[in-house]
Amino acid sequence: MHIPDGYLDAKICIATYAVVIVYALYTWRVLRKKVSQYTLLSASVLAAGIFVAQMIAWPIPGGTSLHLLGAALAGILFGPLLGFYVMSLVLVVQALVFHDGGITTLGANILNMGIVGVVPSYYCFRLLQKLLRGREKWRIVAGFVAGWTSLTLAGVATGLELGLSSVFPYSLEISLAVMSLWHAVLGVVEGLITGFTVEYLYRVESPIVKSSRVVLEEVHTR
């Protein structure tokens, strides 16, 4: 899913960078006085775990690569704002240090995995929790749906960007179909991992869950 340099034309690169910068400025404005050092440490630990999970990738035809994402976990635990920074940290390090994803396409990669992958999964999880009336035994189901949604939507966004790029060798129909299909399939694995991980962290009252609750409460009462 990490788009390398040379796959997107200048217009898409500039547009995706612009969206990411605007969102980053907004999240910084909201979070700058609400996040403690302990919470940042917890978010960094999660980022490290997501970084490791994303290192395993499989190339696919008509797209770039297929791998686990972890964006739903970041969104569920830290919300759509701090979760964005968790994913951005992972993606920036991958691009600058490990050359996983390009520099010109970094905006697109952050948009796909740090915004599209994070924001819908957070609201999906919260909505399902409300519909299920907060029943803890169904929390794993909410996590599964959020994880599947996160990876699938991120794949769709990547396929759209690649297909609309004038320098990409495949058409929109091919890139969108391939990226959407394969990520929807892997989304089942992503959903299972997300659901079981969220359930475990909540059940053992992990310090990450405790710190994330503080952030979400402060942000929503700003």
Image (spheres, rainbow, N blue to C red):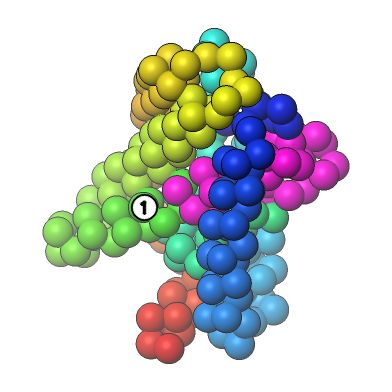
Image: magenta residue range: 90-116
- Quarter-of-image position of residue 1: top right
| Left or right, residue 112 beside residue 48 | left
Using the image as rendered, state which of residue 46 and residue 32 is in the foreground: 32
Residue furthest out toward the top: 61
Q: Amino acid at mark 1?
A: Pro
Q: Is residue 181 visible?
A: yes
In the image, residue 66 lies at what x, y percent?
55, 24
Measuring 46% from the left and 57% from the top, which residue is drawn there? Answer: 75
Q: Give the structural element (helix, strand or loop) at label 1.
A: helix
Using the image as rendered, state which of residue 83 and residue 19 is in the foreground: 19
Using the image as rendered, state which of residue 23 and residue 8 is in the foreground: 8
Q: Main secondary structure of the magenta part?
A: helix
Using the image as rendered, state which of residue 72 and residue 103 is in the foreground: 103
Residue 99 inside the magenta-drawn segment: yes
Measuring 43% from the left and 88% from the top, which residue is drawn there? Answer: 222
Binning the other alpha carbons within 10 Å of mark 1 as few (below 14), some (14 to 19) or many (20 upward) gives many
Residue 171 inside the magenta-drawn segment: no
In the image, residue 62 lies at what x, y percent?
52, 14
Q: How many marks?
A: 1
Measuring 14% from the left and 59% from the top, which residue is drawn there? Answer: 131
Residue furthest out toward the right: 97
Q: Which residue is mark 1?
A: 120
In the image, residue 209 lies at what x, y percent?
49, 66
Measuring 56% from the left and 66% from the top, which residue is drawn there? Answer: 22
- Quarter-of-image position of residue 219: bottom left
In the image, residue 217 lies at what x, y percent?
41, 81
Q: Is residue 55 visible?
A: no
